[in-house]
């Protein structure tokens, strides 16, 4: 079972990614096992403990930010598929998906966008979205602020 994005979800995603994502190709699904969401191409698979809501725009900012994280991966796959697969393999092979998820951490101030791996990029979009929508983000590095995210992330949000 999978579903496309709702019109409200597309509008929310468009406020971050603009026209950089082909939203019509995106499908959301739930997997029976696993602890993490996985995005491959335009398919976003959430773990069993997090059933896909009818509409993410009615959920908490934290949950919406999770969708923005996964849609960052959709954006990466749609625009730079080879880089995305290689970056994923790099994070996997260097233990980035291990305990504490070190592959997701990024320095502050952030390095140039191109030097970040796929998870660091997705984490930055996730944190910037939370800051924009709620004014705070507990997961962001100390001192992080929206202006710096906007300067680093190559999106007009
Ligand atoms: Zn991710």
Image (tube, helix red, strand yellow):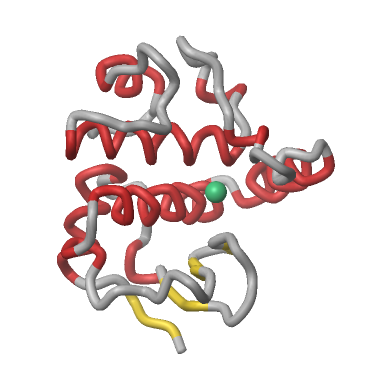
Q: Is residue 126 above or below residue 9?
A: above
Quadrant for residue 135, please give it. Answer: top left
Q: Is residue 127 above or below residue 78?
A: above
Q: Residue at x 43, y 48 (%)?
A: 69
Q: Residue at x 64, y 46 (%)?
A: 84
Front residue of this view, candidates 97 and 41: 97
Front residue of this view, candidates 9 and 32: 32
Quadrant including the C terminus = top left
The x, y position of residue 9, in whole percent, is 23, 63
Quadrant for residue 143, please give it. Answer: top left
Number of disc labels = 0
Q: Is residue 51 above or below residue 57?
A: below
Front residue of this view, candidates 79 and 63: 63
Q: Residue at x 34, y 76 (%)?
A: 4
The x, y position of residue 106, in whole percent, is 55, 23
Q: Residue at x 43, y 70 (%)?
A: 50
Asked whether, in this view, residue 43 is left or right of residue 7, the answer is right
Residue sticking out furthest to the right: 93
């Amino acid at each position: 079972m999978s579903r496309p994005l709702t019109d409200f979800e597309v509008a929310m995603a468009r406020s971050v990614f603009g026209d950089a994502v082909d939203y019509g190709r995106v499908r959301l699904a739930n997997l029976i096992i696993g602890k993490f969401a996985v995005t491959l191409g335009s398919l976003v698979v959430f773990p069993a403990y997090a059933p896909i809501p009818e509409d993410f725009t009615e959920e908490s900012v934290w949950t919406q930010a999770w969708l923005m994280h996964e849609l960052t991966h959709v954006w990466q796959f749609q625009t730079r598929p080879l880089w995305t697969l290689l970056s994923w393999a790099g994070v996997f092979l260097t233990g980035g998906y291990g305990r504490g998820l070190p592959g997701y951490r990024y320095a502050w101030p952030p390095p140039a966008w191109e030097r970040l791996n796929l998870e660091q990029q997705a984490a930055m979009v996730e944190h910037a979205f939370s800051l924009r929508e709620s004014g705070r983000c507990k997961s962001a590095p100390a001192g992080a602020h929206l202006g710096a995210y906007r300067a680093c992330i190559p999106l007009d949000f």
